[in-house]
Structures are given as C-alpha cells and as structure tokens.
Amino acid sequence: MKALKHILRLLAVAVALLLTGAYASAQSVSVRAGDTFTFTVDVQFAEEENITYEIYDDYAGINLAVVPGNCPATSAFFPAGNSGSSVDITWLVPGMYLVKVEAVNNCPTNNMKFWLVEVLPPLPTSSLVVNPDEVCRGDEADLLITFTGEAPWSFELEADDGVNPPVVTSYTNISANPFVIQISPTRTTTYTVIKVTDVNGTNTDPSNSVTLTVKSRPDGSTIYQYEP
C-alpha cells in the first residue's frame, strides 16, 4: 500500500506537468483479477459532454494528454462501452494500470481524471464433488475438493445434516489438489467449504454445496421356519 501511495504521488506530479492548462486529478483503486469495477465521475464531469475512458498498462514517461489507451483487452476491457458518466471495467491480469477519463464540452474545455488501479491476484476458490452421491448407512464416500489459487491452502468444511447443529472442521497446510476426504455420515448430509485461504487472501464464499444421501439399512428380524 505504501508503494501504491508513492506511485500515486508521482503520478499526480506527472499529470500536473503534462496537462498544464487543463483540470486533472488522480486517485487510487484496488481490485481483484476477475472483478468488474464501476468508475463514476463526479458532478463536475457529469455535466460535460463527450465523456470517454481509456486504460493504460504502460504509462511511464508518456504524455497522457495525447497518447491513447494502450492496454490490451486480454488484460482489461470495457464490457459495455467506454463512454458516459459511469462505466464498468473488467480486470483480468494482476498488475498496475491507469484509467483516464476525459470530459470535453463545447467551450472547448478539457477536464481529465485519473485512477491508478492495482489489480491483485484473485482470491482462492474451491469446488466440491462427492462420489458416490448415495450410500447405505455405514458405508463411505469420497469428498473431493479442488482448489484454485496457490498451495498451501487452509479451509473450513461445514457438514449439515439438517437435524443437529452444523459441524465445522478446519484443515491447514493442504498441498494436495484435489484434496480427498473420506466421509461416512449417519444421515443425509450437505457439505460446504465456508472459508478458504491461500497466500493471496481469504475467501469467505468460496464453494458450491454437495449432498451425500444416506439410505438406512433394514432392521434385523427373526426368521421362522415354515412347516406345512
């Protein structure tokens, strides 16, 4: 964060030098790769006409007032166009980016605003599969958990049979992917990873839910011999 603030201060100085005679301001944003972030201009800009946005992934030493955006769509893109008082940008690749918005009125007057965007790696996720999805009481099934992100992972697994309070079990320092847990509940139970952590952070909504159906076995009964 300190590095981001330092870069932002340098950017503000560079903007002031490059845009002498035009209004410009800069601020910072942090997002995760894979996220879509909405950029919105303030009232001063919203009253202008011809509001357009551009994205730069290479902005060192260039004249931002005249050089068009140079970020490839494989790194970041506008899912619904790059004009208007509010636009969305979807971020795909971690790194540092610059977003420029320019508003031009009929005077003409150019107003520019800049966001320095730090795109962080995505948070880890997990995907659950149970095999088989039906067992008889006393038999076992395999719960396969597949992770995204970087090993090792730590996670919390919730087991809910709908009768008793859910049971949460913690697992740490997991490097196997997928990770397999043998389960043998006494009644039908739903499993969900409620939290997973890797080096990039913690995701508190990381997974789907899967249900293992447990069928009861018939009770024993006395066998009688038939005699005609």
Image (cartoon, rainbow, N blue to C red):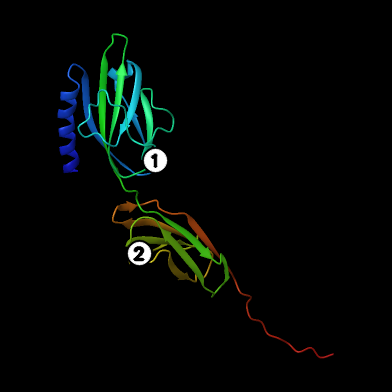
Q: Position of residue 38 (x, y in %)?
A: 36, 32
Whether 221 is drawn above or below 85: the answer is: below
The kind of residue tagged 1 is: Thr
- When asked about the image quadrant of residue 125, the answer is bottom left
Q: Position of residue 149 (x, y in %)?
A: 35, 55
- When asked about the image quadrant of residue 133, the answer is bottom right
Local secondary structure at mark 2: strand
Identify which residue, 13 or 181, lies in the foreground: 13
The kind of residue tagged 2 is: Ser
- When asked about the image quadrant of residue 207, the answer is bottom left
Report the residue at 46% width, 64% height from top: 144
Report the residue at 34% width, 20% height from top: 51
159 relative position to 111: left or right: right
Residue 189 in view, yes or no: no
Local secondary structure at mark 1: loop
Which residue reaches farthest top?
Answer: 107
Q: How far separated are the C-alphas under marks 2 and 1?
A: 37 Å
Q: Position of residue 91 (x, y in %)?
A: 36, 40
Quadrant placement of the N terminus: top left
Q: Position of residue 124 (x, y in %)?
A: 36, 53
138 relative position to 52: left or right: right
Quadrant placement of the C terminus: bottom right
Report the residue at 37% width, 34% height from top: 89
Identify which residue, 34 or 141, lies in the foreground: 34
Residue denoted by label 1: 74
